[in-house]
Amino acid sequence: MPSRISPLQISAYTATSAVGVGKEAHADALAHSRSGLRANDFGEAPLPTWIGRVDGLEDVRLPESAAFWDCRNNRLAWLGLQADGFLEAVAAARQKYGATRIALVLGTSTASIGETELAYTQLDADGNFPPDQRRAAVHTPHSLAMFVQQVLGIDGPSETISTACSSSAKVFASAERLIRLGLADAAVVGGADTLCGSVLFGFNSLELVSTEPCRPFDADRKGISLGEAAGFALVERVQAGESATQLLGYGEASDAHHMSTPHPEGLGAERALDDALARAGLAADAIDYINMHGTASQKNDEVEGALVARRFPARTHASSTKGFMGHTLGAAGIVEAVVCLLAIERGLMPGTVNTRTLDEGFGPQIKLEPATGEVRYALSNSFGFGGNNCALVFGKAVAA
């Protein structure tokens, strides 16, 4: 088991998804079980499915100094960065530590591939991209991080993590290591993923996409609803006198059981859970709220539901929030971390929307309705293709 780590302070955070922009929009949707899913209206030949689409991205304009980076994914990131005073919080950290001492760790699974798809529809007679699409840096997996680093004016270590649906959960683990090893004094973490043809038709080819709004852990669940989102957090060493919510632990594991199916006994997921609890110095029964990965696919829900049932007491409140904003892939980890931070700060534990009848194989921990009460510790599960698993533990600051 890994050793306990020193907590990191979450000094600022924000999320943007199909339910709205910023913390207040998300808290309101979670409290009132208001889903942001809609019938698919993305693309010229929409698949018969439901999606979590962010309104207004087509009209977002990047700052003139960053216009080179224009694409749907970077527009979503820019929209998200402007919420909840996040830009100002990073500016204050930059003033405090210096630009070279702030790391950037972002997760994404598709980056700017939607723009690359568009460019391939605009090839000239010689098979070349049109002049305005000859932006090699935009058509790379690191596009998001390069764009965000520029607009934030930070020059510390910069990483892009792409481990499928655990990408923007694992950013917290990488940031902790960078800070602990003295390579940075603070880190901006997060991620963004946007809808595109590769995502929608790719998941459909795997027969994972539902023709109705997703119903996590439902006895009659039929698959996932894809979405898009962005989220960011500023993490730094705990500051004396501060009461900010903290990152207490993380666990990462790769079971490599199958390209797209979790280990049937949840071995990788359980290893990530055990390591996260060990680094936090907590037992499983200390967790008050669990944000489950809960995609509404048959196998993911089966494995995760069994894991939660056998490891946590019945009183634990667990739910999936995929029914609110859809499965946002590389952005799911950060958005669901934000849900956990809101739960701790506001005592709000969301339910599992759209689900009607829980599969009888799951335990009493999974709740369909929201609840209120003190949340001292929250766990967020993120499980990706290839067995790329990550678990995060957040908690209230402990008075000195």
Image (spheres, grey):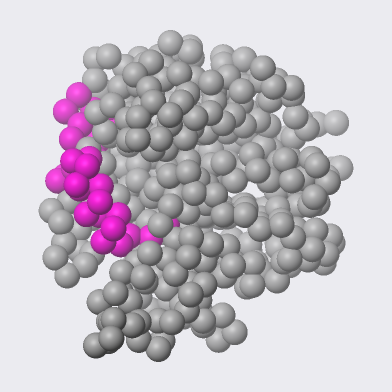
Nearer to me, 162 or 47: 162
Image quarter hosting the N terminus: top right
Position above or below: 63 against 182:
below
Nearer to me, 324 or 4: 4
In the rendered image, residue 184, in percent from the top left (x then y), is placed at 79, 52
Left of 36 or right of it: where is 267? right
Looking at the image, can residue 370 be seen? no
> Where is residue 266, by image quadrant?
top left
Left of 346 or right of it: where is 37? left
Left of 352 or right of it: where is 193? right
Q: Residue at x 65, y 30 (%)?
A: 249
**328 in magenta:** no
Position above or below: 34 against 377:
below
Question: How many badges with numbers are in the image?
Answer: 0
**200 in magenta:** yes
Looking at the image, can residue 178 be seen? yes
**Image: magenta residue range:** 193-222
Q: Residue at x 48, y 65 (%)?
A: 140
